[in-house]
Image (cartoon, rainbow, N blue to C red):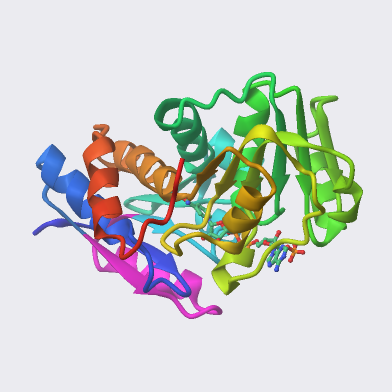
Amino acid sequence: MSDRYCVFGNPVGHSRSPAIHAAFAAQCRQDLMYEAILAPRDGFVDAVRRFVAGGGRGASVTVPFKEEACLVAKRLTDRAKIAGAVNTLVFEGSAVLGDNTDGYGLLRDLTHNLSCQVTGKRVLLLGAGGAARGVIAPLLDTQPAALVVANRTAARAHDLAQRVSRADSLGACGYPQLAGQSFDLVINATSASLGGKLPPLPEGVFAAGSLAYDMMYGQGRTPFLVFAGRQGAARLVDGLGMLVEQAAEAFRIWRGMRPDTTPVMAMLRAAEPAPSATQ
Ligand code: NDP
């Protein structure tokens, strides 16, 4: 019988993870099955238990369960502990390991796929939810000149900055306080694009030559990317590359081999109904 893996989310119907892991498995000649499981918002733990009882070997975790997944794991990797969010679970008998590959995925996409070096840059991170928590420490590790986290609920941005407060270059604020500041890299880690909304950004935050990165994928030009383009950002990128790279890191954790992400990204781009990212 094939080894079983899945992604838990709510909603989860839009997830590309089953197609990505099927492509990785074919490429690496691994006998596995990967499905999308819609867990009830108040039934994540039960859904995980049922999956493990049915022989599940590992799982990806997406919105809104990443924080709850920390409680399911008996052991957390350092990067999951720092994030306080888990996107990858490994089931080994009764032992459950929780990891977070989002930061790896974002940095790999930026530096390897997009040739965008973060070191020495002014970086703005929008949002303070699970996705922002996963990427803030890896971003700081690359030593940007400044990293500002801005959130609609400013207190959550301050809490997040305090969690990882180890650099003078790290700041936190609400959106109005961004007025008059500009950044080389602006990362949208809010869920605003899911609802077709634009975070309330003041004009002028995109420096000349800047890169605008929306973690959302598969939605075409999101309001954030449209706004960034109008405001002079030079490169507009969606989160498909991050999605594939974080999945490749999860696949490595589960199967001990790293797939080549380039053909998988090309396959997903080809399947998109309309161009969704321009670089
Ligand atoms: P959460 O629900 O944990 O956090 C949502 C965040 O978005 C909060 O900071 C919230 O602010 C903010 N927000 C929501 N609506 C708005 C709005 N209209 N204007 C401004 N801010 C808003 O979600 P996640 O952090 O888990 O996910 C965020 C996004 O990142 C999702 O779209 C998800 O699909 C994407 N993602 C993509 C990945 C990839 O691999 N490409 C990986 C992980 C996530 P407040 O605190 O004020 O409520």
117 or 30, which is in the foreground? 117
Q: x%, y% of residue 176? A: 89, 55
For the point 44% across and 74% down, the residue is: 46
For the point 74% across and 35% down, the residue is: 183
For the point 24% across and 35% down, the residue is: 259
Against 203, is 9 above or below? below
95 or 109, which is in the foreground? 109
49 within the magenta span = yes
Left or right of 5 on screen, residue 61: right
Please state the extent of the stretch shown in magenta in the rendering.
Answer: 34-58
The answer to whether residue 100 is seen in the rendering is no
Against 77, is 176 above or below? below
For the point 85% across and 25% down, the residue is: 168
186 or 131, which is in the foreground? 186
Q: x%, y% of residue 50? A: 34, 72
* Quadrant including the N terminus: bottom left
Left or right of 169 on screen, residue 206: left
